[in-house]
Amino acid sequence: MKHIRSIVFPALAILGAIVTPHFGESWDELKFYKYADLSLGAYQTWPTQATVATFGNTYDNYGPAFVMFVSLAAKPLQVIFSESDARHYLYFLTFLAGVWAFHELAKRWLSRNAALFSTLLFATQPLIVGHAFISPKDIPFLSFFLLSLHFGLKLFDSLKPLQTSSLDPRSRRTLLVLSALWLVAVFGLFLFTNAFHTYIANLVASAKAGETNIVTYLASDLSKTDPEVYIQRYFVFFLWIRSFVFLLSSSALVFSGFRLLARPAFHSLLSILFPAVLLGLTTSIRVLGPFAALFIAYHAFRKHGKQAILPLGIYAALAIIVMYLTWPYLWPNPFGHFVESVQVMSQYPWNGQVLFNGAYYRSTELPWSYLPVLFGIQFSEPVWVLATAGLVAAVIGSREKRELALLTFAWFAIPLLGFIVTRAPLYDNFRQVFFIVPPVFLLAGVILERITNIKWQIALMVLCLLPGIVDALRLHPYEYVYYNRFAGGVQGAFRNFELDYWGTSYREAAEYLNLTAPQGASVWVDGPAHIFELYARDDMQVYSDYEMDRAENYDYSVSTSRHDLDLTSQPDAQIIYMIERDGAILTVIKQP
């Protein structure tokens, strides 16, 4: 199996590189990378000016870890790809890492063939494959969630208890004091950053008003200088002192642990680092990252009992540090801004209209059937038949299978019920909750184990995988608009459910006009004009609602079918090109 994976994953990476240029940029990618640039800039402005530029419009409440990484890693890939395509290829590689982690998790509860089948069924879903190339947030979060879960569970599978009872009293006391100092340095100085800033500001303001304090002696020219200059100067000094204390206490703790602990115990401590880094990065992609830690903690306590408390505490502390270091918005006020991000993400203020079953709804007023219906019609037809049969087989099966049924209840059913009951804002179908669907595919693999004949296993695998693969090929490169035959396919979903909600078909529209439009052609673009402009020829004059400039007339107009703009914009103009799949219109080009 290892040899097969060493061939399959590189082959998929090569295939991904070939097809990446087929996919257009998605609607809000541009803003995410502006946010990434601001976040990267904070690594220069925070230690020198104590400032972190904010993007606004709730983007700051998303952790920027992944988009910062992609922004940097895409640069060397631009030898091969355009900037946008380089980013998309990195999304796909991240998805492949998530598929690998899914397969590793599947092997915990399923036989080899069943784990392979579950993984293939998961990885060939048109909805997921389509998002894998164009999503800077939902698929990366899903992949990092799976990676965190796999490595976190694996950590506590093999972690040896951190015994300190063999230490002499003096050594144990030394470790305890250093650990306490380290916790104070990390959680005291960092959590109360905003309080220290307020304290410094009050000191400077008091000195400016004539009161005598330490600032009076340090800032002799305060009466002639703007107080903000000294507030910034002293706060930057505090930041450097805080970093020095943190590094010093961390180094002392690591050095003491290396000297005092037995080698197996010290190596156990080091083994916590990588899983903790993954969890921190997952949380710095989306604040729901700690949901994975709940399963890891349950597994740790089940396996090690009270002895799991210390390694779990270290695991959590390291994850928090990684989250903090990779999320600049938290730096000025770590606790306050994190709580704010949780509140914003739980009731996301999206004001658009959601098309569901032929009617438009506010994202906070969706019917209870929203998620169940979309789950039923956006995965290939065999998925829910297999998952339902697999659930029954798991409940009446072995202890490992009953554990899988319980995992599905905790990972999928409870969050699903929570989203429905709390009426959590959802839009663009259910891409925000991709991270809860993996156990459905794990259950689907259970039923394969009930078939003992290898030929029948292969036949079932082929029969169940073909619908998704065939439909994905037919929809390419718009796999993410997929609906199964229960909804009448993409044609049945047209104007009843959301299709190309990210406007990726505007790449094809631009490429068509690049070949056919005369020099200097003026083009009116509805919706995400920046996507069209990214791929359009430089000589084209692109106009949209986002700019003040207008032309007297336009040679062409480009409209998405989202919100029926293809019908309402330039209704009398002639359609000269239509981008569609299975009779469902995604974008039209008109000539007024």
Image (tube, helix red, strand yellow):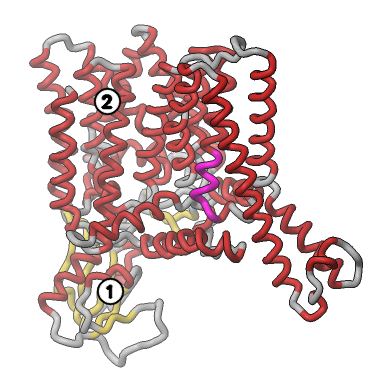
Q: Which mark is residue 533?
A: 1
Left or right relative to 457: residue 386: right
Secondary structure, mark 2, is helix
Residue at 43% across / 59% down in the picture?
36
Query: In the image, residue 398 lies at what x, y percent?
Result: 35, 7
Q: Residue at x 41, y 36 (%)?
A: 145
Q: Amino acid at mark 2?
A: Val
Q: Which percent across, then down, holds residue 279?
A: 46, 36
Pick the front one: 499 or 367: 499
Q: Residue furthest bottom?
A: 552
Q: Which residues are magenta?
A: 320-328
Amino acid identity at mark 1 = Glu
The rendered magenta stretch, by its main secondary structure, is classed as: helix
Look at the image and tell me in which quarter the N terminus lies. top left
Tally of marks: 2
The residue at the point 30 percent across, 68 percent down is 531
Q: Is residue 141 left or right of residue 325?
A: left
Front-most of 535 and 592?
A: 535
Give the percent coordinates (x, y) of residue 473.
13, 46
Q: Is residue 591 above or below residue 324?
A: below
Dividing the picture into quadrants, the one containing residue 433 is top left
Residue 275 visible in the displayed image: yes
Judged from this view, the residue extending furthest toward the left is 455
Q: Nearer the viewer, mark 2 or mark 1?
A: 1
Residue where numbered disc 2 is placed: 385
Q: Secondary structure at mark 1?
A: helix
> Is tag 2's residue or tag 1's residue first in the polypeptide sequence?
2
Classed neighbour count for the residue bearing mark 2: other residues with Cα under 10 Å, few (<14), some (14–19), many (≥20): few
> What residue lies at 64% left-to-right and 24% top-to-bottom?
175
Instruction: Mark yes or no: residue 482 visible.
Output: no
